[in-house]
Amino acid sequence: MSSQELVNLDEFEALAKTKLPKMAFDYFASGSEDEYSLRENRNAFSRIRLRPRILVDVSSVDASTTVLGFRISMPVMVAPTAMHKLAHPEGEVATARAISAADTIMILSSSSSCSMEEVAATGPGVRFFQLYVYKDRQITTQLVHRAEDAGYSAIVLTVDTPRLGRREADLKNKFKLPPHVSYKNVEGLLNVNNLEKTSDSELAAWADNLFDRSLNWKDVKWLQSITKLPVILKGILTVEDAILAVQAGAAGIMVSNHGARQLNYVPATISVLEEVVKAVGGQVPVFLDGGIRRGTDVFKALALGASGVFVGRPSVFGLAVDGEAGVRKVLQMFQNELEITMALMGVCSIKQICRNHVQTEHEHHTAINSKL
Ligand SMILES: Cc1cc2nc3c(=O)[nH]c(=O)nc-3n(C[C@H](O)[C@H](O)[C@H](O)COP(=O)(O)O)c2cc1C
Ligand SMILES: CCCCCCCCCCC(=O)C(=O)O
């Protein structure tokens, strides 16, 4: 079956499952421990209702928007996900081409299986570089400077990963990279042989050995001191940390629970978005990722104050199903679904999406109770 026959993202995931080795599919699909937060990331969207307006002229709908000064085709961008060569032999190079064709933004994972330079060489495109801070700060500094030199436009510092979450599927599978996949950005810089075996998952063991668990707010300042690029903080879930992020000079905040792969029992990202947006008060843009699978999800996030959303697994499953064409189809699906949602909601532009367009579960119950 080709990706052109698929009509929604669940079908992409189902087809990816048939195409990928179990170890790779489980790595991409799973969440941590018993996956409460993974289910919540989706379920919380279904608890938000839409309040459409009618008899609005929607003969022209424009989903384009601006993020950090970059004009893009839609407020749907691609989150960093590691090791795309586990999904497809061309890896992140194919993903990058598809994202450029869709005229949106890619965040390249620092744990990518194509180097940041190979991805940059695919041609023009707005790309941000996601950073994990290694204990070896010289290597971390080199990565940041290479990203600047290669034309990346922002550094996205992931702040929710002092250790890798307990992904039980990876533990059961004894996750190990196949010989054709390696961490290209740090090849020759980090020696992953002879590391302490702290976990049955090779990935978790490497993260345990190499990531800097002492990372703290002072290091955000340190990062800003070594780069001219804007620094976005990815992995914020509370009002308290959102305020600290703004005080630390973050250029943007990503409300994210890492696709529910880190701490289990954290809330669905969509359920904390609004309080974070209110606390930030427009000082910097607030983005969201986690469980976005439909144009209606995108619309709901925007109505609750997001400046844009990022998708993780959908692009990887698109890549697994049909390489570059698969990722293109996934992004096209988001664009089509969002445009249809906008038309049916009586909205012609992203700026017109507002809080009155959605009703949360709490508001729904309050409305019912007030009538009793
Ligand atoms: C397979 C996979 C690999 C990921 N790798 C990274 C990574 O290298 N760096 C990072 O900051 N986040 C990583 N994430 C988290 C994503 O950036 C993003 O937060 C998450 O996937 C969003 O949820 P969604 O998959 O439901 O869209 C990864 C997620 C997945 C599923
Ligand atoms: C050789 C350096 C890298 C070692 C650790 C790689 C961990 C990648 C984790 C990717 C990720 O965030 C995820 O959710 O999976």
Image (cartoon, rainbow, N blue to C red):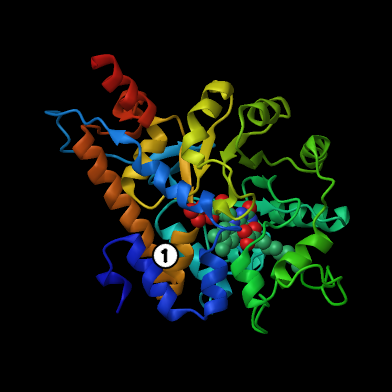
User: Can I make out residue 67 in this image?
Assistant: yes
**Quadrant of ligand 1 in image:** bottom right
Give the farthest residue toward the left: 55
Left or right, residue 184 beside residue 329: right
Figure quadrant of the N terminus: bottom left
From the top left corner, tell me how far across and down residue 172 is, in percent: 63, 74
User: Can I make out residue 125 in this image?
Assistant: no
Figure quadrant of the C terminus: top left
From the top left corner, tell me how far across and down residue 243 is, in percent: 66, 25
Give the farthest residue toward the bottom: 179
Residue at the location (41% across, 37% down)? Answer: 301
On the image, numbered disc 1 is attached to which residue? 327
Which quarter of the picture shows residue 211?
bottom right
The three-letter amino acid code for the residue at tag 1 is: Val
User: Can you say whether 205 is above or below 350 in the image?
Assistant: below
For the residue with label 1, is its CB less than 8 Å from the closest atom of ligand 1?
A: no
The count of marks equals 1
Between 275 and 98, the one lying in front of the other is 275
From the top left corner, tell me how far across and down residue 21 is, in percent: 52, 81
Between 314 and 47, the one lying in front of the other is 47
Left or right, residue 163 beside residue 28: right
Left or right, residue 158 beside residue 190: left
Which quarter of the picture shows residue 349?
top left
User: Can you say whether 76 is above or below 271 in the image?
Assistant: below
Between 9 and 75, the one lying in front of the other is 9
Residue at the location (88% across, 76% down)? Answer: 194
From the top left corner, tell me how far across and down residue 114 is, in percent: 63, 70
Rate crowding at label 1 as few (under 14), some (14 to 19) or many (20 or more) other CA atoms within 10 Å: many
Between 19 and 22, the one lying in front of the other is 22
